[in-house]
Image (cartoon, rainbow, N blue to C red):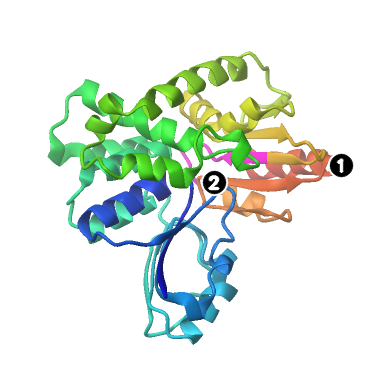
C-alpha cells in the first residue's frame, strides 16, 4: 500500500506540494506530468492507495477516478483553483476548492498552513501570473524589491519548465524539479545553490528572445492571436509568453497557438488582466479545452478549427 502525491507540473503545483511536505513530511509516490497533463488520478489503483493528496489539477477532469478512490474509502485531500464541477460528497474527501481569479493552489495551501512557508506560496502566485496577489501575500515577509523580483523570476522559471507537449520538451521532468526543490525550506537558498535555476534561466532567456521576434498573426483593439511554429521552444514559452503579453497589454486578451507535430495546435489563452474572466468559457467550447477564468487552454485544436477559434476568441473578448 502506497501514499500518493498528485500534482500539476507547473510552479503552482510544485510549490503547493513543497509547502505541504515541509509542514507535513510524508514518503509518497509522485504522480505528475507536463502542465497540460491533468488526467492523473486514473494512474492510481484504489486498492493500492493508503492516502492521496491532489494539488492544482481539475477535479472535473478527474471525477471518475476520484469517485473510484472514494468508493474504496481512500482518504483524499484535494486543493485546487480550477472549476471543479460537482464536488463529490464523501467523508473520505477533504476538498479546498477556491475558483477566485486572484488565487492559486499555492495560496490555498498557504491559507491552510497559516503562512508557515509563505515564500513558496508567493513563488507559486508569481508563477501563475498573479503578481498583485503575490505582492499582497508577501507583505508580512517585508522583502526588499530585489528579493521580490527574485521570487517572481523563480516562479516564472518553474512555470516555464512545465509547458510542453511531452516531457521531452522540458528541461526537467516536474517530479525531478520537485525533488531538486525539496531540500530547500527557503527559496532563496535554492536560487543560490542549485544549478537547476541557472539552467532554466538560460533556457528562458533564449526562448523568450525567439518568441518576441514573432509578430501577431491577427489582432484587434481587444484581442491578439499569435501563431508559433512546431518547435520545442514554442511549446515551452506558450504559457510564460502569454503571461508577459497579458502584463504588457492589460486591457487586451491574448491567445498563443503553437503548432504540434501532428498538425494540431496547442492553445494558451489569457483574459485581460484588468478583467480576468472568460478564458475558461472560451476554451471549454472546444474538445480538450479547459482551465480557469483568467488563464485557460486547449491541448489539441485541429488545424481546420483555428479560424473558428479566432472567431470565438474575438466574440468572447470583444470590447
From the top left corner, tell me how far across and down residue 106 is, in percent: 34, 50
Numbered mark located on residue 54 in the image: none
Q: Is residue 232 left or right of residue 15?
A: right
Q: Which residue is mark 2?
A: 35
Residue 167, located in which quarter of the rendered image?
top right
Q: Residue at x 53, y 70 (%)?
A: 44
Magenta stretch prevailing secondary structure: loop
Asked whether the residues under the numbered discs 1 and 2 touch, taking CB atoms below 8 Å apart as contact, a structural biologist would say: no
Residue extending farthest right:
304
Q: Is residue 85 left or right of residue 109?
A: right
Q: Residue at x 16, y 30 (%)?
A: 143
Is residue 125 at all visible to an observer of this figure? Answer: no
Numbered mark located on residue 304 in the image: 1
Quadrant assignment for the N terminus:
bottom left
**In terms of secondary structure, where does tag 1 sit?**
helix
Q: Nearer the viewer, residue 70 or 87?
A: 70
Q: Nearer the viewer, residue 8 or 189?
A: 189
- Magenta residues (range): 267-277
Q: Is residue 102 left or right of residue 303?
A: left
Q: Earlier in the sequence, mark 1 or mark 2?
A: 2
Quadrant assignment for the C terminus:
top right
Residue 190, located in which quarter of the rendered image?
top left
**In terms of secondary structure, where does tag 2 sit?**
loop
How far is the residue under mark 1 from the one under mark 2? 25 Å
Q: Residue at x 44, y 23 (%)?
A: 199
Amino acid at each position: 500500500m502506497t501514499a500518493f502525491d498528485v500534482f500539476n507540473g507547473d510552479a503552482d503545483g510544485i510549490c503547493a506540494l513543497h509547502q505541504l511536505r515541509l509542514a507535513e513530511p510524508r514518503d509518497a509516490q509522485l504522480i505528475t506530468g507536463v502542465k497540460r497533463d491533468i488526467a492523473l488520478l486514473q494512474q492510481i489503483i484504489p486498492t493500492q492507495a493508503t492516502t492521496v493528496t491532489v494539488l492544482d489539477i481539475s477535479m472535473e477532469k478527474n471525477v471518475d477516478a476520484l469517485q473510484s478512490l472514494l468508493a474504496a474509502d481512500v482518504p483524499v485531500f484535494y486543493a485546487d483553483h480550477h472549476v471543479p464541477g460537482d464536488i463529490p460528497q464523501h467523508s473520505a474527501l477533504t476538498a479546498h476548492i477556491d475558483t477566485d481569479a486572484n488565487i492559486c493552489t499555492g495560496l490555498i495551501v498557504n491559507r491552510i498552513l497559516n503562512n508557515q512557508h509563505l515564500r513558496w506560496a508567493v513563488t507559486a502566485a508569481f508563477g501563475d501570473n498573479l503578481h498583485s496577489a503575490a505582492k499582497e501575500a508577501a507583505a508580512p515577509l517585508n522583502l526588499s524589491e530585489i528579493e521580490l523580483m527574485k521570487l517572481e523570476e523563480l516562479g516564472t522559471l518553474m512555470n516555464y519548465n512545465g509547458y510542453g507537449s511531452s516531457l521531452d520538451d522540458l528541461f526537467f521532468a516536474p517530479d525531478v524539479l520537485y525533488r531538486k526543490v525539496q531540500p530547500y525550506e527557503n527559496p532563496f537558498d535554492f536560487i543560490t545553490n542549485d544549478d537547476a535555476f541557472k539552467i532554466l534561466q538560460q533556457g528562458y532567456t533564449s526562448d523568450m528572445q525567439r518568441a518576441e521576434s514573432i509578430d501577431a498573426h491577427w489582432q484587434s483593439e481587444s484581442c491578439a492571436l499569435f501563431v508559433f511554429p512546431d518547435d520545442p521552444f514554442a511549446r515551452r514559452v506558450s504559457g510564460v509568453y502569454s503571461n508577459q503579453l497579458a502584463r504588457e497589454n492589460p486591457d487586451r486578451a491574448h491567445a498563443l497557438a503553437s503548432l504540434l507535430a501532428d498538425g494540431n495546435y496547442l492553445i494558451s489563452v489569457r483574459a485581460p488582466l484588468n478583467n480576468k474572466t472568460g478564458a475558461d468559457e472560451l476554451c471549454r467550447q472546444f474538445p480538450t479545452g479547459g482551465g480557469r477564468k483568467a488563464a485557460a487552454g486547449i491541448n489539441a485544436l485541429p488545424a481546420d478549427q483555428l479560424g473558428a477559434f479566432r472567431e470565438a476568441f474575438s466574440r468572447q473578448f470583444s470590447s
